[in-house]
Image: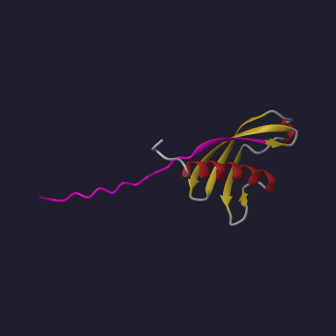
Amino acid sequence: MPILWFIRKNIFVMELNANVKYGDGCARFAIRKENPGIYYAHLVYFDGDRKFSPPQKITLVRGIRQWTGSFDEPGLLNELGSVIEEAYHKMQHQTIFK
């Protein structure tokens, strides 16, 4: 009788929303994970002055001590990164048995 081997690959799709203060307003980003340590943030809503709005798309890359990305504002990158880290930490400590 033949033995069948099944390889199961767990894929976690991480999508979350982040509300951050930016300039004179509040920006809402939809964040999704692309690869380990690489995330994309898409601007969904900004209620401040449109002349000073954040970029529509930001690529976030997790570094050793800080976040870097496609936008040169470390404060915004680290704030979005902290939202990702908090969500990841919560996900790691969830249990299916409650």
**Quarter of image, res 7:** bottom left
Along the line of sight, which residue is nearer the eye, 54 or 96?
Answer: 96
Does residue 11 show up magenta in the picture? Answer: yes
* Vertical arrangement, residue 89 with respect to residue 43, above or below: below
Relative to 27, is 51 on the left or the right?
right
**Quarter of image, res 66:** bottom right
Q: Give coordinates of residue 17: x percent, y percent.
A: 66, 40
> Colour mode?
secondary structure
**Quarter of image, res 60:** bottom right
* Vertical arrangement, residue 46 with respect to residue 66, above or below: above
* Vertical arrangement, residue 62 with respect to residue 41, above or below: below
Q: Give coordinates of residue 38: x percent, y percent.
A: 62, 56
Relative to 86, is 79 on the left or the right?
right
- Residue with the most extreme bottom position: 64
Q: Main secondary structure of the magenta part?
A: loop
Q: Residue at x 62, y 42 (%)?
A: 16
Q: Give coordinates of residue 44: x percent, y percent.
A: 70, 36
Along the line of sight, which residue is nearer the eye, 14 or 96?
Answer: 96
- Residue with the most extreme front position: 98
Relative to 79, is 51 on the left or the right?
right
Along the line of sight, which residue is nearer the eye, 65 or 48?
Answer: 65
Does residue 56 show up magenta in the picture? Answer: no
Question: How many numbered marks, from 0 up?
Answer: 0
Q: Residue at x 72, y 49 (%)?
A: 80
Q: Residue at x 56, y 48 (%)?
A: 91
* Span of residues in magenta: 1-20
